[in-house]
Amino acid sequence: MSKYATILSDVESVFATPLWATYGVSAYPSNYMVSSRETEFVKIEVLPLGGDSDYNRSGISGKVIIQIYVAANQGTQRLMLIADSLDNILQNKHLGTGTKTRESSMSVLGSDRDNPELFRGDYSVDFNYFN
């Protein structure tokens, strides 16, 4: 498998675990059209941003962005709880076959432009992958 596909597989596999299932939040790829009836879900986006080298190894560094969508007009508590859940499975972890994540951050973006019934935040975590 290529390095880019491996990184994507490493990240997406986290959302197929029993631990993620306990949080009760559906996860979709970033380019997936989610039904307008869904009021809580995340979208997974993996951005390989550049080359990285370390001790004669070459790799890729980048960012995982998890777009969090929750019902609008209910405050930010649920958004933050989902971000905390994402920390449990993504922050400072070794994923799959070589992807290692670092510290996370959270950006509250507000009402979704496409569906004002949803409120959005972006959880992001940097990663390195060495083959």
Image (tube, rainbow, N blue to C red):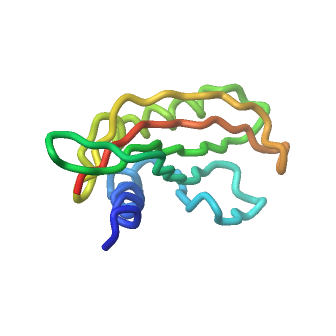
Q: At 85% across and 43% down in the image, what residue appears?
A: 116
| Residue 30 or residue 89, whichever sits in front | 30
Q: At 60% across and 26% down in the image, what residue appears?
A: 77
Q: Is residue 74 left or right of residue 30?
A: right
Q: Position of residue 92 (x, y in %)?
A: 29, 34
Q: Position of residue 86 (x, y in %)?
A: 43, 40
Name the quarter where the N terminus is drawn.
bottom left
Q: At 78% across and 59% down in the image, what residue appears?
A: 36
Q: Is residue 7 left or right of residue 37?
A: left
| Residue 35 or residue 98, whichever sits in front | 98
Quarter of the image for residue 102 reads: top left
Quarter of the image for residue 104 reads: top left
Q: Residue furthest bottom?
A: 1
Name the quarter where the C terminus is drawn.
bottom left
Q: Residue furthest left?
A: 55
Q: Is residue 129 left or right of residue 70?
A: left
In the image, residue 41 sits, relative to residue 2, either above or below, namely: above
Q: Position of residue 89 (x, y in %)?
A: 34, 43
Q: Position of residue 14 (x, y in %)?
A: 36, 55
Q: Residue furthest front?
A: 56
Q: At 70% across and 26% down in the image, what residue appears?
A: 75
Across the whole image, how many numbered discs are drawn on residues? 0
In the image, residue 120 sits, relative to residue 20, either above or below, namely: above
Quarter of the image for residue 70 reads: top right
Q: Is residue 42 left or right of residue 101?
A: right
